[in-house]
Image: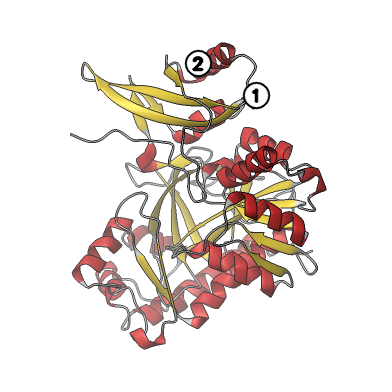
Amino acid sequence: MLFPSKAEIQARQTDRLRRLLRELKDRNRFYSERLLRSGLEAGTVTRDLFTERFPLCSKADFAADQEAAPPFGTNLTHPLEAYSRCHQTSGTSGRPIRWLDTPESWSAMVDQWSEVFRAAGVGKGDRVYCAFSFGPFLGFWLAFEAAGRVGCLSLPGGGLGSAARVRSILEFGATVLCATPTYALRLGDVAAAEGLDLTASRVRLIVVAGETGGSLPAIRERIRCLWPGARVFDHHGMTEVGPVTYECPKHPGLLHVMEDDFLAEILDPVTQAPAPAGQTGELVLTTLSRNASPALRYRTGDLVRARSFSGGTGAGQVSADGVCDCGRSQLGLEGGILGRCDDMVVVRGVNVYPSAVEALIRVEAEVAEYRVRFEERQSMLEMEIDLEPTPGCADLAALVSRVAERLRDHLALRVSIRTVPPGELPRFEMKARRWLKPVAH
């Protein structure tokens, strides 16, 4: 398959950006004022000029806008009666944000999710099981509809308990499972507890999203062990912008940004300057095909690191002539989503991210679940971990010792570990909440 070159991608981005700004100029109250202040001309704007002069936007900006103009705010390019879909963010990092879509913008996002499926090798004849309740969040609905668009049988798993879902997956002969990494693990554990043999499962592919674990080798390996014969395929997106990336078919753990639909930047979270190539920065996105309720230079809060495929490097981007082994010239994010800007905690002078702790703990197959807590002692923040072993854990003391030693070696921290009985810690279908951040005083 022939993929567009970097030059072709950038030409399309410029064309779509100009079209978007022309549409927003007199019709979208949220952005028309920002566009006016930037002094940019929609018909002649370039990508570089746009990223230099257009202001950044954050979730707090949208929250304040919806507070001032309830219930949907002013980021609407069309009259309200033109919109047919309403979704909202999970609220894990503040007040939930509502997002509206017209049939056209919704269809564009279904196309993006369809691209995720195609990159994963999903197509006609597959049976896609969506293992989640269909609440107000965006991704579940898109995945379900996109599966049908690429010719699959879409199997909804809403309204069922975990055991019933595993039975449905087996009975329906599902070949593709969509879930968060945490819930894919949970379903595997439930199958074992219920005596359900997953070697009889036809699931050949597990498409995960919603958490950083989808690109962590330890998590991927554990999912594969629980689901024999299944390949793990990561992607990510968010309610505010829609589906953004999919895993490189040649490089597990590398996510390609769908640059036809997004203008992506990687910026230093503090200085907001372009992050040097190969260094971690915050992913900033401009939607190029979701014009009804767009996000321009949106600070996602996701920490990423670009991979340069060949030639010279730019500021946080692949080189102009860079081509991945898979043939794509799209921006590649090494290791997927590395963490969240607002999740980082400083413990005794060490910057600690949830994904780093997750990667170190999940190496141990005898860890069923865990939780990280923080406590201030003598004006210093200390980290403590609640560790729940699997029912068949052979040597609990040895497990604790190995986890503590690994944390000490990799984070240079001595961490207190408390063990809890099997089944005590909460289980999650949606995004897991294992990271109990300290309360600000």
Q: Secondary structure at mark 2?
A: helix
Quadrant position of the N terminus in the picture: bottom right
Q: Secondary structure at mark 1?
A: loop
Residue highlighted by disc 2: 404
Whole-percent x, y for residue 318 in the image = 58, 49
Mark carried by residue 372:
none
Q: Nearer the viewer, residue 73 or 251?
A: 73
Please say whether residue 348 is visible from this viewpoint. Answer: yes
Q: Nearer the viewer, mark 2 or mark 1?
A: 1
Name which of mark 2 and mark 1 comes first in the sequence: 1
Callout 1, which amino acid? Answer: Gly
Mark 2 and mark 1 residues within 8 Å of each other at the beta carbon: no
Residue highlighted by disc 1: 392
Task: State the residue at coordinates (42%, 63%).
Answer: 240
| Cα–Cα span, label 2 and label 1 | 20 Å
Callout 2, which amino acid? Answer: Ala
Task: State the residue at coordinates (40%, 56%).
Answer: 90
Q: Nearer the viewer, residue 236 or 320?
A: 236
Whole-percent x, y for residue 204 in the image = 77, 51
Left or right: 418 with respect to 208?
left
Whole-percent x, y for residue 22 in the image = 40, 80
Quadrant position of the C terminus in the picture: top left
Q: Nearer the viewer, residue 321 or 57?
A: 57
Whole-percent x, y for residue 414 in the image = 42, 14
Where is 312 relative to 373, above or below? below
Instruction: Please rate how many residues cluster around mark 1, counting C-alpha atoms within 10 Å: few if below 14, some from 14 to 19, many from 20.
Output: few
